[in-house]
Amino acid sequence: MKFAHFSHIWCKPEMSPHQRYEQLWRELELCDQLGFEYSFCVEHHFRPDESLMSSPSLYAVGAGARTKNMRVGPMGYIVPLYHPLRLAEEIAIVDQMLGGRMELGLVPGINADYFKPFGIDYDFRKSPTFEFVEYMRAAFGETQPFSFHGPNFKTDSAKISVQPFQKPNPPMWMMSRDPETLEFCAQNGINSGYFLIYPRKDAAPRYRKFLQDWKAAGWTQKPNLAYCTIVYVDESDQAALDRAAFRASRAYEGFLKAPEPGETFEDRVREHAARFTGRGEPGAAEIMCNLFDQDYLLKNELVFIGSAKTVAEKLRAAAESGLFNTFLGEFNFADLPEEDLMRSIRLFGEKVIPALRDFEPY
């Protein structure tokens, strides 16, 4: 298995953005020392109460400057929000600055609120995301200047002044459970994966097909399939539960809409749950409706909290049932004190990673 530090860079009310970023670098420096393979961030916009990361390129360069071994990148760029030529140039420069340590996550975006201020149609987002893969390959090709004419993008005679360090491009990821997207990823050699909000029992059949399609496409290397959720490790199960169980139930408060004056947390949760009731994916809808229920999260092992031995056992079982070989752990959540945060990362790196390093779920 492979392991990543994953972060929304959640807003901490008691910290300024600068202080929050400085804490983030301390996390990544420790992860790098402990042998984590990857470091990933989100791209979120327009919610200062939620995530403090709207520029994944700056994250990648900052992370790269403070680490020596980890591969870093976005998970991922919201492709429709960028001009494709500008994004291709930026990816190449980031990869050069990182000396070839960039991992490239691309996503169409799932939050319509990110699109409105940019004046971009949220309903028209998947096609340009797929097309950007072809566009990027043309931009990074041997023919320079390059031209590209597609349904969404048109570029004539543009010369990329800085090409990526990695050829033909940094390794790509596209986190998705959508069957059409997974077929596209398998055909194009793009790693994939999913978040805790999609049930592992529902995910496994889709990713088995992905693996079959990957092999049929002729790729010889094994793909990475990721799973992302909250993780907390402590000296004992009870200590871990005491410090992190309730906080895990508040980890994704940023998914709720911004609070209105006089509105309670419970009011926001009810409104959030109502949005998912009756949707076409009952398993995912159930998780989203119970995302803030501590007992539900623990009972269904949607978060991994416990001693190193317990977390390793739960993670191994989840990887077998959910068919993933890369774990994206979100270590910093809610109001977890930094002392507990860093102890959790250290115990994970020193005890959980060695216990699972040689484990291959597929």
Image (cartoon, grey):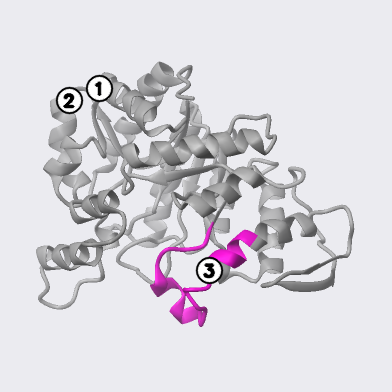
Residue under the image location 46 percent in, 75 percent down: 115
Callout 3 secondary element: loop
Q: Amino acid at mark 2?
A: Asp
Which of label 1 and label 2 is nearer to you?
Answer: 1
Q: Secondary structure at mark 2?
A: helix
Q: What mark, if any, has residue 310 been given in the picture? A: 1
* Measured Cα–Cα span from mark 1 to mark 2: 7 Å
294 displayed left or right of 318: left
Query: CA–CA distance between discs 3 and 1?
Result: 41 Å
Asked whether the residues under the numbered discs 1 and 2 touch, taking CB atoms below 8 Å apart as contact, a structural biologist would say yes
Q: Does residue 127 show up magenta in the picture?
A: yes
> Is residue 356 depicted above or below 151 in this figure?
above
Residue 69 placement (x, y as % from top left)? 59, 33
Q: Residues within 10 Å of mark 3 (few under 14, many from 20)?
A: some
What x and y, as percent, mark residue 196?
Answer: 32, 44
Q: Which residues are magenta?
A: 107-130
Residue at label 3?
A: 125
| Label 2 crowd bin: few (<14), some (14–19), many (20+), radius 10 Å | some
| Residue 188 in sight here | yes
Does 203 sit left or right of 283 as displayed? right
Residue type marked 3? Arg
Tell whether label 1 touches label 3 (CB within 8 Å). no
Q: Place residue 265 in its image quadrant.
A: bottom left
Q: 58 or 25: which is nearer to us?
A: 58
Instruction: In the rendered view, tell whether residue 253 sits above or below residue 298.
Output: below
Q: 84 or 97: which is nearer to us?
A: 84
Can you identify the residue that label 2 sits on?
A: 237
Residue 328 visible in the picture: no
